[in-house]
Amino acid sequence: MRDESQPLPEPGQPDPSRRAFLKHSSALAALALTPPVALTAIDHSLDERLAAAFEQLPLQVRINGQAQQLSVEPRVTLLDLLREQLGLTGTKKGCDHGQCGACTVHVDGQRVNACLTLALTTEGREVTTIEGLGSEDKLHCMQEAFLRHDGFQCGYCTPGQIMSAVACVREGHADTPEQVREYMSGNICRCGAYANIVAAILDVKASGQKV
Amino acid sequence: MNPFSYARVTTPPAAVAARTQQPGSYFLAGGTNLVDLLKRGVVVPEKLVDITRLPLTAIEATPTGLRIGALAKNSTVADHELVRRQFPLLSQALNAGASAQLRNMATVGGNMLQRTRCAYFYDTSLPCNKRVPVQAGPDKGQPNGPTGCGALGGYNRMHAIFGADAGVAAPKCIAVHPSDMCVALAALEATVVVVGPKGERRIAFRDFHRLPGDNPRQDTTLGADELITAVEVPANELAAHSTYLKVRDRASYAFALVSVAAGLQLEGTTIRQARLAMGGVAHKPWRLFEAEQFLRGKPATLATFQQAATLAMKGAKGYGENDFKLTLAPNSLVEALTLATTPA
Amino acid sequence: MDINPKNQPVDRVDGRQKVTGSAKYFAEFALPRTAYCVIVGSTIARGTLDQLDTKRAAAAPGVLGVFTHLNMPAIPGWDAPVGGQADGPPPQPTAETYRILRGTKILFDGQPIAMVVADTFERATYAASLVKATYTRQTPKTDLNKHLAAAIAPSIPWMKDYSRGQAEAYKTAPVVLEADYVVPTEVHNPMEMHGILAQWTSPTSLLLYAKTQGVNATQRAMAQAFKLDPRNVKVHTEFMGGGFGMGLRTWPQETAVVAIARQLGRPVKLVMTRSQMFQLVGYRPHTRQTIRMGADATGKLVGLVHEATAETATYEDFTEGTVNMSKFLYACPSMQTRYRLVRLDRGVPIWMRGPGEATGAFALESAMDEMAHKLHLDPLEFRLRNYSETDPEHNRPYSSKNLREAYERGAAAIGWRNRPATPGSQREGEWLVGYGMSTGTFNAMRWQATVRVVLQADGSLLVQSAVTDIGPGTGTALTIIAHNVLGVPLDRIKVQYGDTSLPPAPTQGGSAIVSTVGSAVFDTCSAVKQTLVELATRPGAPLAGHQAEELALADGQLFVEAKLATQVAVAELLRQNQLASIDKTTESKGGPEQQKYSFYSYSVHFVRVRVNPRTGVVRVTKTVSVADSGRIISPKTAASQMIGGVAGGIGMALTEEAVLDHRFGRYVNNNLADYHVAVHADVPEIETITIDKPDYLLNPMGAKGMGEIALIGFAAAVANAVFNATGRRVRELPITLDKLLAVS
């Protein structure tokens, strides 16, 4: 292991052990997609950042109506891309394994779990997050209904609930309380605001507003 | 997740070729199971081959029934008019699975290849005979955690009561297949269409998933370089009396303790034909052939259902915490048959 | 006139931020150069760490440091206090010590053995997977059931055995019940994962975005750990994605992150995994209880013994009020309680919503139902026959108790008269139907807090308190209290909270925050009002000659109540006196009356269930919960707390159990797919009722706590309803279907 008396390398500075690692594992695995020049670059101990760049692939995706030209590692999930790289922190991480729904976003209009969506698979798609739904000054009718019915307490599952609720109505799965409960069961609320969430969704549905 | 490479393909042959060229690569479709396994370190791949752009999403009527593209989303299939009308069992089973979000992501092909939810499989520090060696990085070729079956003598509430000891002196794995959709497809006698380097191949659903036997690593009979392209469901006369009953620990968004796919064809109150399969009880969707045969020609009464349930339980065996399934499974079968024959 | 008339429902003051995603939780603050920390946990529960290979992790791309017991930076004042104030004393250290990343001894599953830091989340996570450990494994002791013989009496005065009246008089009664009840390990699982974002802003000052129920408690703990002036430790937790008790202490991994951030010279963020949420931030302890109860033929309790044995860690004794409510809820002349602990190879528990009282109520309120059945009495009638008019534990009056009214209103709302007298006799189609009820109670407390209130010349009001809001709507309640005292329109009041730069407040827990911080808001606003009155009634002032008692405030106007026309705008008053604002900061706490009375909140839960006789599946189809918790300050958010208690209660009753494989001492369902918290489909129509009668002995608003009682007792109501539906008594939670198979 690293000798603790040695100073840690400054970020961005080349570290021989790390280059060796790159060469032998991930970069090699990326062979099929990596121009030979990249491997040469790694071999010749160029800046690690250059090597890192070759671990990333281009991604073009529209997020909340804006075209984004990004560069991401294949293992980056849509959730972590949104939260850690794009500052779109309205989408929440509640479990990171598709077991809670806090990360629900729309991809091409369909609600999905962003935590199980590898970012690269959204190439060419349209992603909508809570930030794209409405703003504090101009709430979406579902956001208004959640506010009116107090469909939350701590607020952490709320963006996911709202994104899911909008989809639930659009899908035509909001006709009865039982149906809403079943089709919203992928969104866990530990504060237990379920009854108010169901009331908010049924309210929006009954109002006939465009969601 | 380990660093891996990524390739996007647009034709089935290219998909097969990409996988064939690089052992340790995986097809990525909906990702609902694979990405979870990557995060847990259960799968450590060299490469993911993104097949989500393949043109395999069609759902279409055929002269003999219905053909569903392997990349059709679970939600699309569940809500499809033809499926709802002709194969309500499939629609119900799909809607009983996971959540609306996951059903929007998960594909029919991926659902068939879903791995077990066994806790020991998912925790690479606990013993499991199902995990394969690490396929990438510095540990390549090394076992991915200790071997053995942790569930035997451990937490096996969710586990198998059928078929774990078939062909072996003692079970090596008591995991169950977690899919709902597959239980319905088993009852519906579907056919899986696959393509490999040597071309297309068709696999009867009952032969698609396998029992653990000596090789629990292998869930299916699909070749390592084969791609599922479609599933075909033959037309039947079961639509009017179909029930998918899922018994689980909470009302939704939970895996089955026991599920039953029951489809009956009735003539008056006489059973002309029965198709029965159970989930949550075996390493594969568990067809109840003997009970089906028994029910043929019998009156649709509680007494008949109970006799069928007794027959269905032949060979069942509990492993401790799942002993309750020896009662729950036959009761669930009776309940499902009752629901299937109760006018709505 | 009631100084606090019934309040109207208002929307949550922070609601817009929550529904738009603009509310920022700890992990969402962007600090330049933030590095990501990932914990590597032990895969054994007891033994020693032999070898730890961190070479490959350290060499992995982007890695900035791999911290282990061999190179962990020093934490100079390590012994951080717990900082919890919810329900009793903090966990007490034992002879064993646990200090994160210090030494090779493994005391529990998941104990951190390394913390890996890298420049991206993905790289840190991958590098963490490359850390390889070998252990000398010892057989872990994690099963409470197997080690009951090792139970000890905790050496905490608070938890001493209790007795009144003739010892074990229950034995002399004509009808006797003896039964064991089990509550399994349950885990808080707030939706937001735990962690911390730490930045050293100078060699002696620290900025923390934390997930804590008390910013001042975290501030004290970190100041002590790093020997800093507390004023140089800034802690921010404005929004917290649920706590339920897990944020009642500063956990060791938080302190470790702070130490690592200092070593690396850049901000470090830790967001734990969901699996680690089971291992590293406490849980409701697995508890076995025995109730021994005797009653006479008239349905009067003769004697009651309540014993509890709970799991704890080897390195800390965690205790909670499991047996407390038995001491005073019913009028019973003979009463004994005993509380024991078994030290196991487990991480330490922490209070979880309702805490020990929720565990205890399951036993006591199930037993009350069982005894009623033995006596052929309606369980509600049995409770009324043993109603305690005064506190039998302390021999003093209750400050207020409207439990009888709560029983009546709840019974009417659920349709208690439809309850079948004979278990298993009512059906709906093929499903069995049953009704159950229970009582809950929890201390109503008032602690100490300081609040600053600034009335601006433009008539707007600023209220400041460091208090954290874990979700119940603290900001909303404080806004309403300020509005009620000063008449400033709700939308002109801004409450700032959740930051140590604001006046100190206690940790949010124990259902005491509205009572404590709300009182401080009330008192400080009252001081502002007094200043206004003085300004307005001075000779020559607009309301000169009027007495303070005649004056009222509303809509930014100070007016003479009897003569509505005689008024002055608050803003005008400040202008006339050339004041930019009236700025008051006061400290507030309860008075001597707190010793003269017993203060409790009460809840009553009624549930209706359906049970499938073939599969044993239980569905709760209707619930009514009634709260007797004083004046309701914020009816809308109070109702949300109550429905939240019901959802939590359904989980506790039917589905929640954290399962260990005792061969390994390791969790096998530590994720949200396998640990079943209630989902939408589990939660039916819920009716909530508040008695809404003020208790001015506790505080000037007359408000008592709500958060705990919303859950306490609920699981027993479900168990009792299941018995009524099926005739099957389940004494071990959760009531999963296997316990009810073949009930027809």
Image: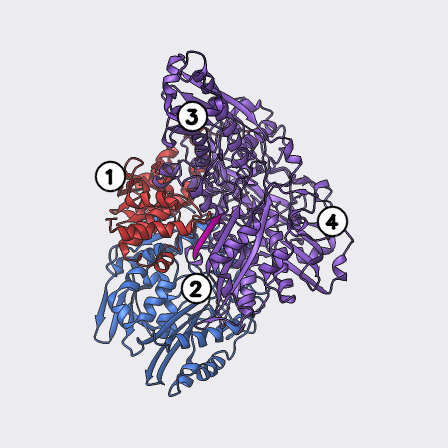
Mark 1 vs mark 4, CA separation in Å? 63 Å
| Chain under numbered label 4 | C
Left or right placement of residue C258 versus residue B236 in this view? right
Residue marked by disc 4: C152
| Label 2: which secondary element | loop
Mark 1 vs mark 2, CA separation in Å? 39 Å
Nearer the observer: mark 1 or 4; the answer is 4
Mark 4 vs mark 2, CA separation in Å? 44 Å
Check if mark 3's residue and mark 1's residue have beta carbons within 8 Å: no
Residue marked by disc 1: A66
- Name the colour assigned to chain C in the rendering: purple
Residue C723: image location, x then y, percent: 56, 66
Q: Mark 4: few, some, or many residues within 10 Å (few <14, many ≥20)?
A: some
- Name the colour assigned to chain B in the rendering: blue
Amino acid marked by disc 1: Gln
- Name the colour assigned to chain A in the rendering: red
Residue C561: image location, x then y, percent: 42, 27
Residue C16: image location, x then y, percent: 35, 38
* Main SS, magenta residues: strand
| Label 1: which secondary element | strand
| Residue A189 appears in view | yes
Q: Is residue B103 magenta?
A: no
